Image: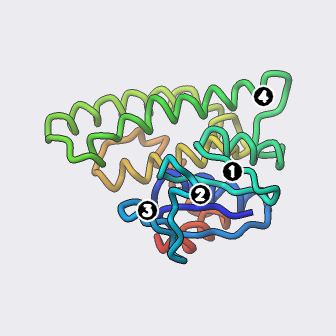
């Protein structure tokens, strides 16, 4: 299987999760401006949406979108999702929240937004992250064990730091804890981020 990523993009969450799950995969960098992969392939023939993440399975089937890919990984390595009857539902809830309420709020920072738009977005991001800090059930979102949703939140925290946005202290500690995980270091090294 192969993960298509852009360094530091949201695909980093999938990259980390694949390593954490112990799954065997290849990875290939994509230039999102030119839509070319590092081997010169036209990325839009792999994913017509033209953005990452994209995971091509060994069967040839292609998965896109963080929520879907991270959910797929959690099904391969069930230790990466909360347990119990409602565990999967709670995981989807967290992934959807990070995707729709936090990830999308970064748009002004990546699309040339004005200073005012960025300031307003920063306020929304802090509010959304504060909710997660308050509802965290331990060292990670669901308690003492890491989940794929934690990796997605981790990337959002990297983006916040890169854009000098305020985040709750509890989440800064969470980010620093995750930075120590071998899967995080490996993925960030592959992406040239460390």
Residue carrying label 2: 46
Cα separation between marks 2 and 1:
8 Å
Quadrant of residue 20 within the rendered picture? bottom right
Q: Position of residue 165 (x, y in %)?
A: 30, 45
Residue 62 circle label = 1
Contact between labelled residues 1 and 2, with CB atoms less than 8 Å apart: yes
Element under label 1? strand
Disc nearer the start of the sequence (2/1): 2
Residue hosting label 3: 35
Q: Nearer the viewer, residue 107 or 151?
A: 107
User: What residue sits 23% from the left and 31% below the top?
Assistant: 120
- SS under mark 3: loop
How crowded pointer 3 is (Cα within 10 Å; few <14, some 14-19, many 20+) is rated as: some
Dot 3 or dot 2: first in sequence order is 3
Name the residue rendered at 62%, 59% in the picture. Answer: 15
Nearer the observer, 142 or 60: 60
Quadrant location of the N terminus in the rendered image? bottom right
Q: Residue furthest left?
A: 115
Residue 58 versus residue 80 in the image, above or below: below
Real-space CA distance between mark 1 and mark 3, rounded to the nearest whole angstrom: 17 Å
**Relative image position of residue 128 (x, y in whole percent):** 42, 29
Tag in front: 4 or 2: 2
- Residue situated in front as seen by the camera: 41 or 99: 41
Side of 133 relative to 56 (left or right): left
Q: Secondary structure at mark 4?
A: helix
Question: Which residue in the structure is indicated by mark 4?
Answer: 87
- Residue 16, percent from left and from top: 63, 58
Q: CA distance from mark 3 to mark 2?
A: 10 Å
């Amino acid at each position: 299987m192969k993960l298509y990523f852009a360094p530091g993009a949201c695909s980093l969450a999938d990259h980390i999760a694949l390593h954490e799950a112990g799954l065997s995969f290849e990875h290939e960098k994509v230039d999102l401006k030119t839509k070319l992969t590092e081997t010169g392939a036209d990325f839009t023939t792999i994913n017509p949406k033209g953005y990452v993440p994209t995971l091509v399975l060994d069967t040839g089937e292609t998965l896109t979108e963080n929520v879907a890919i991270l959910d797929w990984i959690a099904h391969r390595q069930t230790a990466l999702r909360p347990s119990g009857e409602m565990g999967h539902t709670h995981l989807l809830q967290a992934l959807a929240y990070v995707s729709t309420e936090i990830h999308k709020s970064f748009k002004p920072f990546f699309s040339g937004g004005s200073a005012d738009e960025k300031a307003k977005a920063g306020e929304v991001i802090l509010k959304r992250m504060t909710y997660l800090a308050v509802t965290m059930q331990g060292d990670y979102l669901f308690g003492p064990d890491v989940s794929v949703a934690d990796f997605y939140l981790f990337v959002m925290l990297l983006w916040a730091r890169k854009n000098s946005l305020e985040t709750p202290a509890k989440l800064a500690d969470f980010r620093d804890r995750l930075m120590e995980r071998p899967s995080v270091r490996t993925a960030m090294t592959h992406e040239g981020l460390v």
